[in-house]
Amino acid sequence: MTHAVVTSDSLTGALDRLVDRVHGAELAVVLSPDGLPLGASRHVGAKLAEQISGVVAGLLALGQATTRTCDAGELRQIVVQMSRAFLFVATIRNGTILTVRIAGDDAEVGDMAYEVALFVGQAERHLPVRLEPASSAMSGDSGVHHRRG
């Protein structure tokens, strides 16, 4: 069973810096593979983090269904454009999910796309272990399945 070893100060600081670097960025949240909030930028309370988690779970389900239908490889990023904001959802190699919201008429969307890609590429510094969904970790699933005859 793999346990996540995440220092919340390091992750919070990294998310704060991500939000600070891009004009219009409002918040950033990192979720576990199961959609549980692992860390967030400043001004993101537990209730907002849970709401974001629910929204992201739905978006990821749609994105993963799309990748299966299109036979286009793994899901890497989802961008939702609204009339006054963008929501970036990016998968990270270790199984976690980065979500960033940017808003405003003069928001730097291209800069945010770049910063999201940069964060994902360097995420191992803030999330040093591979995280597994709790369903497999809790059941003691080693990834090896035996066929019963």
Image (tube, rainbow, N blue to C red):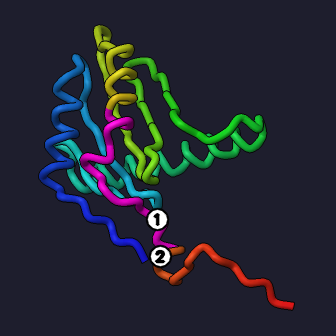
Above or below: residue 77 compared with residue 84: below
* Residue 110, position as x, y percentages in the image: 38, 14
Residue drawn at x 22%, y 39% is 15
Residue 53 as seen in the image, left or right of residue 147: left
User: What percent of the width, then of the height, locates residue 70?
Assistant: 76, 35
Residue type pointed to by label 2? Ala
Q: Residue furthest top?
A: 106
Q: Residues within 10 Å of mark 2 (few under 14, many from 20)?
A: some
* 79 in relation to 9, above or below: above
Q: CA distance from mark 1 to mark 2?
A: 7 Å
Residue bearing the label numbered 1: 132
Q: Which residues are magenta?
A: 119-135
Judge by depth and name the residue closer to the eye, 95 or 47: 95
Which of the two residues, 67 or 149, is positioned nearer the viewer here? Answer: 149
Q: Which residue is mark 2?
A: 137
Q: Check the picture and name the quadrant holding the C terminus.
A: bottom right
Query: Along the polypeptide, which appears first: circle 1 or circle 2?
Result: 1
Instruction: Give the residue drawn at x 73%, y 84%.
Output: 146
- Mark 1 near mark 2, Cβ–Cβ under 8 Å? yes
Q: Quadrant of the N terminus?
A: bottom left
Q: Is residue 54 left or right of residue 108?
A: right
Queried whether the magenta region covers residue 101, the answer comes back as no
Question: Callout 1: few (<14), some (14-19), or many (20+) C-alpha neighbours within 10 Å?
Answer: some
Q: Position of residue 127 (x, y in %)?
A: 30, 53
Q: Is residue 33 left or right of residue 112?
A: right
Whether 54 is drawn above or below 117: the answer is below
Numbered disc 2: secondary structure? helix
The amino acid on which the numbered mark 1 sits, given as a three-letter code, is Glu
Is residue 127 within the magenta segment?
yes
